[in-house]
Image (cartoon, helix red, strand yellow):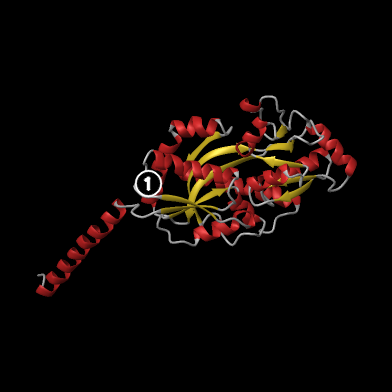
Amino acid sequence: MRTSRGRVRWASLAVAAVVSSVVTAPAAAQYPNRPVELVVPYAPGGGTDIMYRQIVKVIEQHKLIPVAMTVVNRSGGSGVVGKSYAINKPKDGYTLVAVDQGNGQQELLGNAPWDFRKDFTYIARMVTDVNLLIVRKESPFKTAEELLAAARSKGKGGLSVGGTGSGGVDHIANISLNRAAKVDLNYVPFKSGGEVMTNLLGGHTDAAWANPNECIGQLESGQVRALAVAAEQRLKLLAQVPTMRELGFNVVSTQWRAVGAGGNLPKPIVEYWVGVLDKVRKTEEWRKGYLEKSVLEDGWLTGDAFVKFVAEEYETYKAVFAELGMLKKK
């Protein structure tokens, strides 16, 4: 027989359960209810910065979320400064961050204080991109062959090539080209694609690695010219530019950009942003106004498939860095 004390205890538990459901359900339903910060861990003007500002622009144009969303640039350390800031914020969905290959690369190079698996939530991969080898219009080099011939003639470090960070995709492309072409192009790291372009146009570097969307304006205006593309095949918008493979060098440099957050972001919040970003990528402004004009590919990938992709890529870079003698984390 249940005692009065027992009845009181069970009634109290029941009330607590009801109160709990009343408190938590609206909280989840009301997300987001204050401004969201989107951290870009690179300086303004680069391909990464351009993409995330476009995401925010489309979200605002179509009123896809009920609150303001702001891009915040926190550059430094090839993305380490901004990403470290973001993953140490509360895991409440109000701080998102640009994620890319650098998550795993910087950890392997010993530059990052994180575990790429545990400390990040991978929400949605948005695009894939390639790298072009470019020179300014005043450059004496009209082809990649001429550039490489001059590099051989000048010897070690005789020609400089700008890029967006040590250990990054374009740095590896530079190392791969040096090996394949038996040259020694001096890689000069900058904080963003914008800085890379500024230094190239200013004559501070002889050439540069750049994503098409970082230099399409300068290509169209004739300020720079592309000598080669590190892609599987020629780009439709730049069909006259040969691939590295066509020139005899097995150099393919592809990178991806995605939206993420600190580790263990609650599943309902992850699903919320997957839904929002899926709407973004289906808009005309995104497909025609951004992807096509920027010579980018839709890289949509979410959930377990995205996490698996990141983990497999990490192992690939681990092998590459070990071969190059750059691996710091075993």
Question: How many labels were placed on the picture?
Answer: 1
x and y, in percent, of residue 80 in the image: 60, 57
Q: In which quarter of the image is the N terminus?
A: bottom left
* Other residues around mark 1 within 10 Å, as few (<14) / some (14–19) / many (≥20): some
Q: Against 230, is 310 above or below? A: below
Q: Residue at x 69, y 31 (%)?
A: 222
Q: Which residue is drawn at 72% across and 42% down?
A: 201
> In the rendered structure, which amino acid carries the disc numbered 1?
Tyr
Q: Residue at x 86, y 36 (%)?
A: 149
Q: Would you say residue 309 is visible in this rendering?
A: no
Q: Against 17, is 252 above or below? A: above
Judged from this view, the residue extending furthest toward the bottom is 5
The answer to whether 83 appears left or right of 17 in the picture is right
Q: Which residue is drawn at 58% across and 59% down?
A: 81
Q: Nearer the viewer, residue 102 or 292?
A: 292
Q: In which quarter of the image is residue 15?
A: bottom left
The answer to whether 159 appears left or right of 49 in the picture is right
Q: Nearer the viewer, residue 134 or 107?
A: 134
x and y, in percent, of residue 74 in the image: 56, 56
Judged from this view, the residue extending furthest toward the right is 153
x and y, in percent, of residue 259 in the image: 49, 47
x and y, in percent, of residue 65 in the image: 36, 45
Q: Nearer the viewer, residue 192 or 90?
A: 192
Q: Would you say residue 94 is visible in this rendering?
A: yes
Q: Nearer the viewer, residue 277 or 321?
A: 277
Residue tagged 1 = 272
Q: Is mark 1 on a helix, strand or loop?
A: helix
Q: In which quarter of the image is residue 228?
A: top right
